[in-house]
Image (cartoon, rainbow, N blue to C red):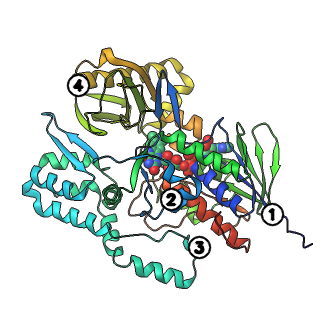
């Protein structure tokens, strides 16, 4: 009988969605994988937790790739039976209101969006129509993401180039214009202000077009059951495929010899050997702590040393459990504050934005609502230091901010204070503690004109048998993106190991 060659062993650091997705696709291709995760459960940033009868989704507001027409759907569907999930599609991307409680609804449906914007700001017809044309144009785009560019043949690259050619000029153009710059073109002051709230001000306009495209086509929704359900299902798939998961195993070092990675060392000193090491953990920790800064190439330097990449501004994550039904409000609402709230030495907010989850029965008991807020908290070092050196003040500050948010909500909606049953405040220090993510930020890098088209840092030149995946290796984060990266990484490893990639 012909002896089957022994499959290579792969260690993956981090059980976020990126690490687990890579684990699943590598298991499907016969590799023997083990994931080492510092925390006691999987999911990384994609987690939910329970507090006093409420389930706080600490992550998902919308998940792209929920319908077969979206190109990242097959990656999800290889890991989760997508038909078994219920997705909630909101009528609006967001709604913003002014001091007089007049609202602009940024509808998911592009025709309704157009009608709404024209009704609210007829003087901006030309500028509105220009944007709407852009959204309509990208409704036709179907980016070919079935393979990473690293494994494409010349013929495949040409085909991709051909299919993207009609869209590239507009993409490049609107990657160079920020939302703020576009909003400056509106004559109507309310629309200008609300546009800057609804769409991240310093992000390229193009990054606001795609979420609207997905929403219009019902390709991005909220999964009932939330983040924990999604992470749990992928962990289950990984184990069914024979993957081995180790929790409470903090990796401190990636072992190398003669420029080849060959193992990891844990906090307790234990060492584990493998043929290939993949880091799906925070990129900065991977490069400067686990690898002690010994291996750097252009891609690493662009991200961590040359400031070509900038991290997304961190936020707090404040959850309120309220004994009141908010289902008559839009799922995401911006409203102005009579009194600004100071978050930290670098951040004060004069608007608040909340999301509610009233259509998901698992979020709150019947008739009650879970509300989450994400006020900017740019001074992540302040939160880190405070937690480390003055725990009382840290807790007091969290309580003060929660109480000021409740006050603001009370002023806006009335009779809120007496209905608040649960408050929970997460700071950048919490994210760092649980997930190691640098600056406590949530989606790694800002997508900017400088990062557009930059290659994924799958490998570091000069270090063999080592790969990276996940939001820090890429140019941006997001759930469908890191799940896709798991598949792409497995394709790259298969190519480098001279074996045919398969999905089962
Ligand atoms: C509040 C919030 C809202 C978000 N909203 C959305 C949204 O609506 N839609 C969307 O698509 N995305 C959203 N995101 C972003 C999305 O969650 C992330 O981009 C994605 O989960 C990143 O996955 P990852 O696996 O790359 O990283 P992570 O989830 O950070 O996983 C990395 C894992 O590595 C582990 N690890 C780190 N260091 C070590 C070590 N030394 N040893 C062992 N293990 C280690 C960590 O504990 C973690 O489990 C949101 C994120 C947050 C926090």
Which residue carries the number 3 mark?
A: 150
The residue lying toward the viewer, choosing from 206 and 180, is 206
Q: For numbered disc 4, what is the local secondary structure?
A: helix
The residue lying toward the viewer, choosing from 134 and 392, is 134
- Residue 451, image quadrant: bottom left
Q: Which quadrant of the picture is home to ligand 1? A: top right
Indicate which disc, 4 or 1, sits on the residue closer to the N terminus: 1
Q: Position of residue 349 (x, y in %)?
A: 30, 34
Q: Is residue 189 left or right of residue 454?
A: left
| Residue furthest top in the image | 418
Q: For numbered disc 3, what is the local secondary structure?
A: helix
Q: How many marks?
A: 4
Q: Is residue 425 left or right of residue 16?
A: left
Q: Which mark is residue 413?
A: 4
Q: Position of residue 298 (x, y in %)?
A: 57, 65
Task: Check if mark 1's residue and mark 3's residue have beta carbons within 8 Å.
Answer: no
Please identify the quadrant where the C terminus is shown.
bottom right
475 up-or-down from 380: above or below: below
| Residue furthest front in the image | 84
Residue 392 visible within the image: yes
Q: For numbered disc 2, what is the local secondary structure?
A: loop
Q: Is residue 345 left or right of residue 127?
A: right
Q: Mark 1, mark 3: which one is toward the viewer? A: 1
Q: Is residue 271 left or right of residue 416?
A: right
Measured in 3D between alpha carbons, the distance from the residue under mark 4 to the one under mark 1, in whole angstroms, is: 61 Å
Q: Mark 3, mark 2: which one is toward the viewer? A: 3
Residue shown at 54% from the left, 54% from the top: 304
The residue lying toward the viewer, choosing from 233 and 31, is 233
Q: Mark 2, mark 4: which one is toward the viewer? A: 4
Q: Local crowd at mark 1 within 10 Å, few (<14), some, or many (≥20)?
A: few
Q: Position of residue 80 (x, y in %)?
A: 56, 52
Residue shown at 92% from the left, 72% from the top: 1
């Amino acid at each position: 009988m012909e002896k089957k060659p022994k499959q290579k062993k792969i260690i993956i650091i981090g059980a976020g969605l990126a690490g687990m997705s890579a684990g699943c696709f590598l298991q499907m291709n016969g590799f023997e994988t083990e994931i080492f995760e510092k925390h006691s459960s999987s999911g990384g940033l994609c987690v939910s937790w329970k507090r006093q009868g409420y389930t706080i989704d600490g992550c998902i507001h919308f998940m792209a790739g929920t319908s077969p027409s979206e190109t990242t759907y097959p990656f999800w569907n290889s890991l989760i039976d997508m038909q078994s999930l219920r997705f909630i599609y909101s009528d609006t991307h967001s709604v913003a209101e002014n001091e007089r409680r007049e609202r602009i609804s940024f509808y998911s449906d592009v025709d309704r969006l157009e009608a709404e914007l024209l009704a609210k700001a007829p003087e901006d017809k030309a500028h509105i129509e220009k944007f709407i044309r852009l959204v309509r144009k990208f409704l036709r785009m179907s980016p070919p993401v079935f393979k990473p560019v690293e494994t494409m043949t010349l013929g495949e690259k040409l085909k991709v180039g051909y299919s993207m050619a009609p869209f590239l000029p507009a993409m490049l153009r609107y990657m160079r214009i920020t939302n703020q710059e576009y909003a400056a073109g509106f004559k109507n002051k309310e629309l200008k202000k609300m546009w800057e709230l609804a769409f991240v001000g310093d992000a390229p306009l193009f990054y606001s077009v795609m979420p609207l495209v997905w929403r219009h086509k019902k390709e991005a929704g909220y999964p009932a059951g939330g983040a924990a359900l999604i992470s749990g299902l992928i962990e289950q798939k990984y184990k069914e495929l024979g993957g081995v998961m180790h929790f409470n195993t903090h990796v401190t070092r990636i072992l190398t010899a003669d420029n080849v990675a060959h193992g990891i060392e844990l906090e307790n000193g234990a060492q584990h050997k493998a043929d290939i090491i993949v880091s799906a953990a925070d990129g900065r920790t991977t490069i400067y702590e686990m690898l002690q800064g010994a291996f750097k190439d252009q891609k690493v330097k662009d991200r961590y040393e040359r400031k070509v990449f900038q991290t997304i501004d961190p936020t707090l994550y404040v959850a309120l459990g309220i004994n009141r039904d908010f289902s008559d409000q839009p799922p995401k609402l911006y409203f102005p504050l009579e009194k600004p709230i100071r978050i930290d030495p670098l951040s004060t907010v004069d608007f608040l934005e909340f999301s509610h989850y009233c259509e998901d029965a698992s979020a709150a008991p019947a008739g009650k609502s879970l509300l989450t807020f994400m006020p900017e908290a740019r001074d992540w070092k302040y939160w880190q230091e405070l937690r480390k050196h003055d725990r009382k003040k840290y807790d007091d500050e969290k309580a003060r901010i929660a109480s000021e948010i409740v006050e603001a909500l009370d002023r806006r909606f009335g009779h809120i204070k007496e209905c608040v049953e649960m408050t929970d405040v997460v700071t950048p220090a919490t994210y760092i503690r649980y997930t190691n993510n640098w600056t406590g930020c949530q989606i790694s890098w800002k997508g900017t004109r400088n990062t557009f088209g930059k290659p994924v840092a799958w490998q570091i030149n000069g270090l063999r048998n080592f790969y990276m995946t996940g939001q820090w290796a890429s140019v941006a984060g997001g759930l469908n993106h890191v799940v896709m990266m798991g598949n792409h990484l497995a394709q790259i490893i298969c190519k480098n190991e001279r074996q045919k990639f398969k999905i089962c």
